[in-house]
Image (cartoon, rainbow, N blue to C red):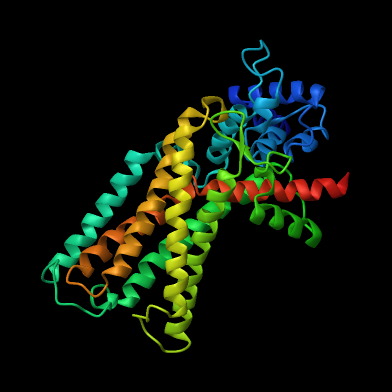
Amino acid sequence: MQRLNIDVLIEEAQVLSPNEAEAARVMQVCNACRYCEGFCAVFPAMTHRLEFNKADVNYLANLCHNCGACLHACQYAPPHEFAITVPQAMAKVRLETYQSYAWPPRFAALYRHAGITTVLALAGCLSLFLLLAVAMQGSLLHEPLAGNFYRIFPHGLLAAMFGGVFVCALLVLMTGVVRFWRGISGGIPQAPAALEAAGNALTLKYLDGGHGEGCNDENDRFTQRRRLFHHFTFYGFMLCFAATIVATGYHYLLGQEAPYPLFSLPVVLGTLGGIGLCIGPAGLLWLNLKRAPLHGDAQQKGMDRGFCLLLLLISLSGLALLAWRDSTFMGALLAVHLGMVMALFLTLPYGKFAHGFYRCAALLKWAIEKRQR
């Protein structure tokens, strides 16, 4: 009886959803054609397989960078009766992947509700709560505090709240990624494979359309815009993260407490990161509005746009806070900015932010797979 139950569980785990079955059908046709074999990592990885089970489809879907080049090159794309739309088929499976491996599983449905309305409502509620906290201290308007944020919210309170939420969110997200890695039988990475995957992720190698010309957005014209705006977004985020790490070092190791001068390392890093997070998300939001419908999944547009808009608002409010940190309404600006940052941290495990981690895992599997075969 026990053996029978295990067999049933294994069989159920291999049953493809309708979206996964469609992606498997698309891959079967592509595997027979192979015209796009040099476009990105998906197609050479596809040629290693004769059939496509659940793990294969999930892996290939997250290996796809949605550059759109294969759609415009395909002779079987709509209106052909085969209706091959690789970018759209993969995008639909990616969302199911995030939900399938999300932890805790009961929160998986949040991926479908992380749209603009939800994100802005959460950010607005948190900002309002912090504005009330500032008002309870006396007034939203106060005498200039020379940029000393900790006169509004103590350093220990901010470090505990935001550090704790960020670490918990990251652990929840990484738990899902580890489950995904095990589900696709990722294996044990060696240093050469890990270095190759890291290089491909940091340079966004597979957003070049396979020929170095870039992506297709609203039509078949190649452009580097998506790659460029992704770089601004990623490295802007990393510069802001670096600014936080450096400021933490200043505080705990050097005994230098904020506020820091405008040309100090934490402020310079944060300013550059904020500018990057203005340019990148604004550009990606613009491109998302222009993209051809067959390039993605319409159900995910809300999640994509909500994430970009939240990053943009965080960067704008952060730069505004820096510019007017010695004003009478610094406390109000700080409350609004922190509310948006907390909304980002709370939605990290169940929003668009997750796609980078799943894609890195798929890139690592591809780097391992190439060396095995």
Residue 70 lies, with reference to residue 229, above or below; the image says above
Is residue 132 or residue 12 the one in the foreground? 132
Q: Which of the pair 344/305 is nearer the observer? A: 305
Quarter of the rendering containing residue 156: bottom left
Q: How many marks?
A: 0
Residue 152 falls in image quadrant:
bottom left
| Residue lying at the far right of the rendered structure | 373
**Residue most toward the top?**
81
Image point (38%, 58%), residue name: 315
Residue drawn at (80%, 27%), measured in percent from left and top?
Answer: 34
In-image side of 356 versus 109 (left or right): right
Q: Give percent across and percent down for residue 370.
A: 83, 46
Residue 216 visible at all: yes
Residue 351 shows up from this direction: no
Farthest left residue in view: 138
Residue 370 falls left or right of residue 143: right
Residue at 28%, 75% in the rendered image? 149
Q: Quadrant of the N terminus?
A: top right
| Quarter assignment of residue 225 | top right
Rendered residue at 40%/37% (across/down): 113
- Which image quarter is the C terminus in? top right
Indicate the position of residue 2 as horizontal and vertical percent values: 69, 34
Q: Position of residue 372 (x, y in %)?
A: 87, 47
Of residues 105 and 309, the one drawn nearer to the viewer in this rendering: 309
Along the viewing direction, whichever of 129 and 316 lies nearer the viewer? 316
Which percent across, then down, holds residue 362?
68, 45
